[in-house]
């Protein structure tokens, strides 16, 4: 079974803090994604990585950065957390290459910025 | 990037009836169209997907159709059951293999 694990289920941070959300997958997937999920807005893509050290901006990258130093780990960084970044964050991974395949999701991190 | 629109946002059906959810996409290079189901408090999980070289795919009570010319695809659930109640998301890949989602449809199956 593919396993995508996010480091925290719930997180509470203060405005202005630097926040790290970690995601690890155990299936040697090339692609990894970070989404945020808000009611009525669906899953919005923040960043996408198709290989180590490679990244592409999604729809809403402002206020976020990412790091992928190892193939299995994809980190989302909130440089200076703000209240409008309170949300559910979902990480996902999939095989790369020309044939797109199923994306497997982590359990999500509910981040509250106070 | 890709723009995926999904309708309706909520859908209530009687048990045993059919449910249809529709999505449109904007990137003509898109070639992969998965559908995910998310139950309350759980992660999204793939239920069916279709590639651009296929017009229709069926898996038991679930079917997906794709019209590449019109850039729209639909999910059909027949003989709905209470356990089908969930939020359903359509998605499409853009030319760079990014995966973009629609805004979701909350399906309620009334027993």
Image (cartoon, coloured by chain):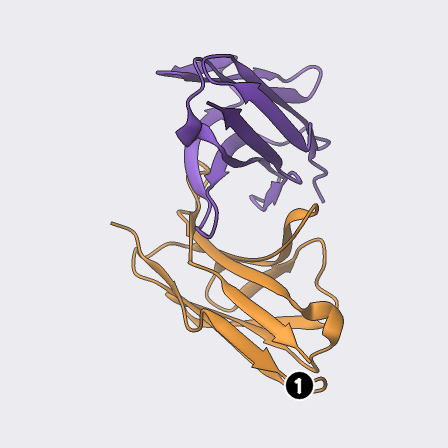
Chain colours: A orange, B purple
Label 1: few (<14), some (14–19) or many (≥20) C-alpha neighbours in 10 Å: some
Give me the residue at 56% from left, 62% from top. Answer: A89
> In this rendering, is residue B76 above or below A71?
above
Query: Which SS class for mark 1?
Result: loop
In-front residue for pair B105/A63:
B105
Q: Quadrant of residue B2?
A: top right
Give me the residue at 73% from left, 77% from top. Answer: A82
Q: Is residue A71 visible?
A: no
Give me the residue at 46% from left, 66% from top. Answer: A52
Q: Which quadrant would the N terminus of chain B be assigned to in this image?
A: top right
Q: Is residue B36 visible?
A: yes
Q: Residue furthest left?
A: A1
Q: Chain of mark 1?
A: A
Give me the residue at 75% from left, 67% from top. Answer: A62
> In this rendering, is residue A17 above or below A42?
below
Q: Quadrant of residue B104?
A: top right
In-front residue for pair A64/A52:
A64
Residue B80 coordinates in the image, percent (x, y): 45, 19
Residue B64 coordinates in the image, percent (x, y): 50, 18
> In this rendering, is residue A22 above or below B15?
below
Residue at which label 1 appears: A14
In-front residue for pair A99/B40:
B40
Q: How many marks?
A: 1
Residue A34 coordinates in the image, percent (x, y): 55, 59
Instruction: Answer left or right for A5 relative to A49.
Output: left
Residue A30 coordinates in the image, percent (x, y): 41, 55
């Amino acid at each position: 079974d593919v396993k995508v694990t996010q480091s925290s289920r719930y997180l509470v941070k203060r405005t202005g803090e630097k926040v790290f959300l970690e995601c690890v997958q155990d299936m040697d997937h090339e692609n990894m994604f970070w989404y945020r999920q808000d009611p009525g807005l669906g899953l919005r893509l923040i960043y996408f990585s198709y290989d180590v050290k490679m990244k592409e901006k999604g729809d809403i990258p402002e206020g976020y950065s990412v790091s992928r130093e190892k193939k299995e780990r994809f980190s989302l960084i909130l440089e200076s957390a703000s209240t409008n970044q309170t949300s559910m964050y979902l990480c996902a991974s999939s095989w790369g290459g020309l044939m797109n395949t199923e994306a497997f999701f982590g359990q999500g991190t509910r981040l509250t910025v106070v | 990037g890709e723009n995926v629109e999904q309708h309706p946002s909520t859908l209530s059906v009687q048990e045993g009836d059919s449910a249809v959810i529709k999505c449109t996409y904007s990137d003509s290079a898109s070639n992969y169209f998965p559908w995910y189901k998310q139950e309350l408090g759980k992660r999204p999980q793939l239920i069916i997907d279709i590639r651009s070289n296929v017009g229709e795919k069926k898996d038991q009570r679930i079917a997906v159709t794709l019209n590449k010319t019109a850039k729209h695809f639909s999910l059909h659930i027949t003989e709905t059951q209470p356990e089908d109640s969930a939020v359903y998301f359509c998605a499409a890949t853009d030319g760079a293999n990014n995966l973009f989602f629609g805004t979701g449809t909350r399906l309620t199956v009334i027993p």
